[in-house]
Image (cartoon, rainbow, N blue to C red):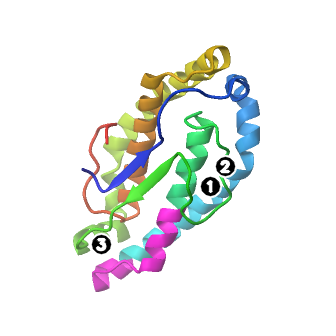
Amino acid sequence: MYPINVTTGEAGARSQGLGWAGAVLFVKLLLALPHIIIVGILGRLALIVAYIGFFFVAFTDELPPGLRKILVAIMRWEVRTYAWVAALTDEYPPFEWEEVDYPAQLTVEEPAERSKGMAWAGIFLVKFLLLIPHVIVLAFVAIGAFFAMWFNFFKIAFTGESSAAVHDFLTGTMRWGSRLEGWAYGLTDEYPPFRLEA
């Protein structure tokens, strides 16, 4: 199993009001705006922290626990935010840096050892060239996820139920994106697979 994973609980009953808010996507995004702003700012911070981390790994074979904690916390906040926006949960995400009991969870296993070569690839930005195939494929998957999410909003609004297939697809899309992000940040050296499944 890949060392970075996202879980979002089960599909099922959802708030029809939130389904309608999603159907009028502007309303859902307006409610999520504080989180989206925070996640955007934290995402810029994560790039800086990850780049500093590459130097630590390149020279010491270690990613300092504090840097790792910052990167995982930022990714966790992103997962909670986007899981709520995509109606994978009805529970509004908490404004919390630490790990909390929330339906959408991110897990990141600590690797036994780190690759100095991958750290140097990160320092010289070569690592980001290796992201290109994933970014291209994931862009098409994300377009499909957007339409699936929109369909699911209407399904929830009219039936009060989330589609299990759409729920799994959206969770898989988030999982793929999180794996890619974690690999880019140097949280794992294992190249991410081209798949949605856990």
Q: How many circles with numbers are drawn on the protein?
A: 3
Q: Toward the viewer: 139 or 108?
A: 108
Mark in the foreground, 2 or 3: 2
Q: Amino acid at mark 1?
A: Val
Residue contact at pointers 1 and 2, CB within 8 angstroms: yes
**Which residue is found at the position 27% from the left and 52% from the top?**
2
Q: Position of residue 24 (x, y in %)?
A: 73, 24
Residue at mark 3 to residue at mark 1: CA–CA distance: 27 Å
Magenta part of the protein: which range? 55-73
**Which residue is found at the position 57% from the left and 43% from the top?**
82
Queried whether the magenta region covers residue 187, the answer comes back as no
**Which residue is found at the position 60% from the left and 62% from the top?**
42
From the viewer's perspective, is residue 147 above or below residue 191? above
Sequence-first tag of 3 and 1: 1
From the viewer's perspective, is residue 65 above or below residue 177? below
Numbered label attached to residue 39: 1
Queried whether the magenta region covers residue 61, the answer comes back as yes
Q: Which residue is mark 3?
A: 120
Q: Amino acid at mark 3?
A: Trp
Graded by Cα atoms within 10 Å as few (under 14), some (14 to 19) or many (20 or more), the crowding at tag 3 reads some
Q: Amino acid at mark 2?
A: Ile
Graded by Cα atoms within 10 Å as few (under 14), some (14 to 19) or many (20 or more), the crowding at tag 1 reads many
Q: Secondary structure at mark 1?
A: helix
Q: Which residue is mark 2?
A: 36
